[in-house]
Image (cartoon, rainbow, N blue to C red):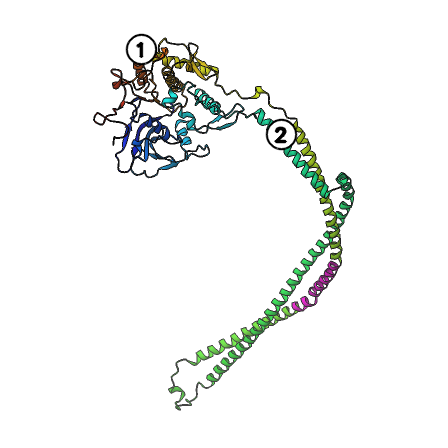
Amino acid sequence: MTASLMLRHLVYTGTGVSAATLRFGPGLNLLLGASNTGKSFAVKTIDFMLGAGGRLPDIEERRAYDRAWLGLSTQGSGDLTLDRGLKGGALQVSSGLSEGGDVPKGARRLATINNAERSDNVSQFLLELIGLQHKLVVTDANGAKRPLSFRDLARYCIVDEASMWNDVSPIHSGQHIKKTVERSTFRLLLTGADDSAVTQVPAPKLRAASTAAKVEVFDEMVAALDAELASHFPDAEELAAQGEKLTAPFETLKAELQVAQDSVRALMAQKRNLMQELSSHEQRLADIQTSLARFQQLDAIYVSDVQRLESLEEAGFVLALDGEKDCPLCGAPSPAQRHGHPLREIEDVRAAALAEAEKVRRQQVDLGKTVVALQEERDAVASGPFPAARDRLAQLEQELSRLTPQVSATQNRFTDLLKARERLKWGLALLEQRRMLVRKREEAASEKPAPRAERLDVGADGTATHSFAQVVGRVLHAWRFPGQPQVSFDEQDYDIRLNGKRRGDNGKGVRAITHAAFKVALLIYCRERGLPHPGFLVFDTPLLTYRDPQGTRGGALAPDEAALAQSPLKEHFLQHLSSLSEMGQFLIVENIELPLGTARQALQVQEFTGSATVGRAGLFPLP
C-alpha cells in the first residue's frame, strides 16, 4: 500500500480553559450534531493545520483558545503532531502525538509558503510523507510549470460544505486562472506522472509582445553603437583599410623590439652571472682573511705552549741535579730526607714535557704550511679572476647603458603603434557588434508565433478518465444510487455525467453525493493502482438531501433530490465507507440522524447535541 496520512486528534488549547478535543480512528469516523455547534469549524481547522492560508472564522466560542494541535499517523515516519497559532503564521511539527501544553523539544518550524528547494515548509513536508515531493504541474496551456503544493491536493481530501454542493467540477475551485493547474494535478493523481518533461511554448500574445520588446531593445542598442561610432570613429568605413596598413609596420617593429629585448636580456643574464661570480670571490677572500687571523692566534698559542713545556723540562732537570744534596732548609742529609714522589717520577714528567713540546713544534710547522697556502690562494684570487670579473662587469654595464635608450625608444614606438592598433580593433569590434545586432534584430522581427498544434494539451489521458468513471459508477452502485446510472467522464467540464446528464445540472443534494462519490472513487482508483494519495477524506455534509428533524435546512426538494431522499443511499453510503477502512480514513460531518446500526460500524462517532445538559454540547464547551 502506498504511503498515506491518518488523522488522530484535533485539540484546541488556551490559557485558563480546558482543552477541546476531537479524536479520530482508522476507517469511518462520524461527527454529528445540530447546526452551529462547531462541526464546520473543525473541518476548516483541519485544512488550516495542513497549511491553508487565510483566517479561521471568528466564532465567539473559540476566542479563549489560541492554539490548535493536529495529530497524524504516517507510514514510515510514525506519529507526529502539527501545532499552529489560531491567528495563523508558521507551523511546528514534532514527533509523537501531543495534545497541547509546552511545545515538545526538537520541534521543527514549517513555513506556509511552498518551496520545492527546501523541506522546511508544510507543503513539501506533507508531500514527502505521501511520496509526491519534487513534482511539477503546468499552470497554463503554454506549458509554464511550478512545483506541486499540498494545497493543490487539499481539495481531494478536505471538502467543505459549500464545495460539496457546488455545480463546478470536484477538481475545480471555480477560479478560471487555476483551471489548468487543477486539471494537471488531477492528471498527476490519475497517472502518477507529473509535468517535468513538458516544454514551455510562449503564448502568442506574450510572444508578440516579447518580439516587439526584443526589436525595440535591439534598435536601442544599435542606436547606442551608432552614437559611439560617430563620436570616436567618424571615418568608421575606413577602419578595415587602416587596419591592413598597420599590419606590416606593426609586425616589423614587433620583430625589432624582440631582437633588442633579447640582446638586453642576454646582457642582463651575463651581468647576473658575473655579479654572482664576484660575490663568490669576495666571499672566498673574506673567508681566507678570517682563517689567517685565526691561524695567527693559533700560532701564538703554539709558541706559548712550547715555552711552557720547555720551562717544565728545565725545572725537572734542576730538581734531578739537587736530589742527593742536604736540605737547604733544615740541613738534613739526603738519606734522612723523605720525598712524596721519587726522583724517577720527576724524570718521567721531564721526558713527557720534551715529547709534547716536539709535537707542538710539528703542529706549528704544519700550521705554517697551511698559512702559506692560504696566502698564495688569496694572492691568486685577488690578482686573477676577481679583477677580470670586475672589468667584464664594467664592460657589460657600458653596453647596457648604450642599448637601454635604444630599446626604450623602440618600446615607445611599439606602444604607440599598439595603441593605434587596439583602437582600430575596438572600432572594428563595434562594427561587428552592430552587424550582429542588426542580424538578430531582423531574426527577432521575422519570428512567427508557434502554431496552435504545438500548444500543450493539459487534459488527462482518455483511457485513464474512462477507467476512473467506471470506478465512480462502482461507488454509486455500492451506495444504491437511484436508477444505477451509467457514468462517463466529460472531457470539457472535467466532471462526470450520469446517463449523459452533466453532474452540475442536478439539484444540490445530488451534486453533493456525486461530489463525494467522485472523491471516494479517486481514493479507490489510486489505491488499486498503487498511486500516491493523501489517504484520508473529510466531507462536510455530503448527505445534503437528508434533512435534519428540526428542518433547519427547509425548502422543497428537487425531483432528483426527492428520489434520492426516498432511497436507502444513506445507509449504504455509510456501510460502504466503513468497508473501505483498509484503503483510507473517512471523516463524515453531518447533522442527520444515523440509520439503525450505523454507529456500531464506525470506529469513532462523536455527536454535538447543542445542549448544555445532554451529552457534549459542541466543539467548544458552552460558557
Secondary structure mostly seen in the magenta stretch:
helix
User: Nearest the camera: 553 or 150?
Assistant: 553
SS assignment at label 1: loop
Pointer 2: what residue? Answer: 212
Tell me if residue 8 comes above or below residue 515 in the rendering.
Answer: below
Residue found at the far front of this picture: 555
Whichever of labels 2 and 1 marks the residue nearer the N terminus, that label is 2
The label shown at residue 171 is none
Residue 429 in view (yes/no): no
Tell me, yes or no, whether the highlighted magenta stretch contains residue 272. no
Tell me if residue 172 comes above or below residue 620 in the rendering.
Answer: above
SS assignment at label 2: helix
Asked where in the image residue 151 lies, by quadrant, the reply is top left
Q: Position of residue 466 (x, y in %)?
A: 44, 14
Tell me, yes or no, whether the highlighted magenta stretch contains residue 382. yes
The amino acid type of the residue labelled 2 equals Ala
Q: Position of residue 277 (x, y in %)?
A: 66, 61
Tell me if residue 620 comes above or below residue 105 in the rendering.
Answer: above
Looking at the rendering, the stretch of residues picked out in magenta corresponds to: 377-401
Residue placed at 70% from the left, 36% from the top? 432
Pointer 1: what residue? Answer: 566
Image quadrant in which the C terminus is located:
top left
- State left or right for residue 332 relative to residue 452: left
Residue 392 in view (yes/no): yes
The amino acid type of the residue labelled 1 equals Gln
Asked where in the image residue 207 lies, by quadrant, the reply is top right
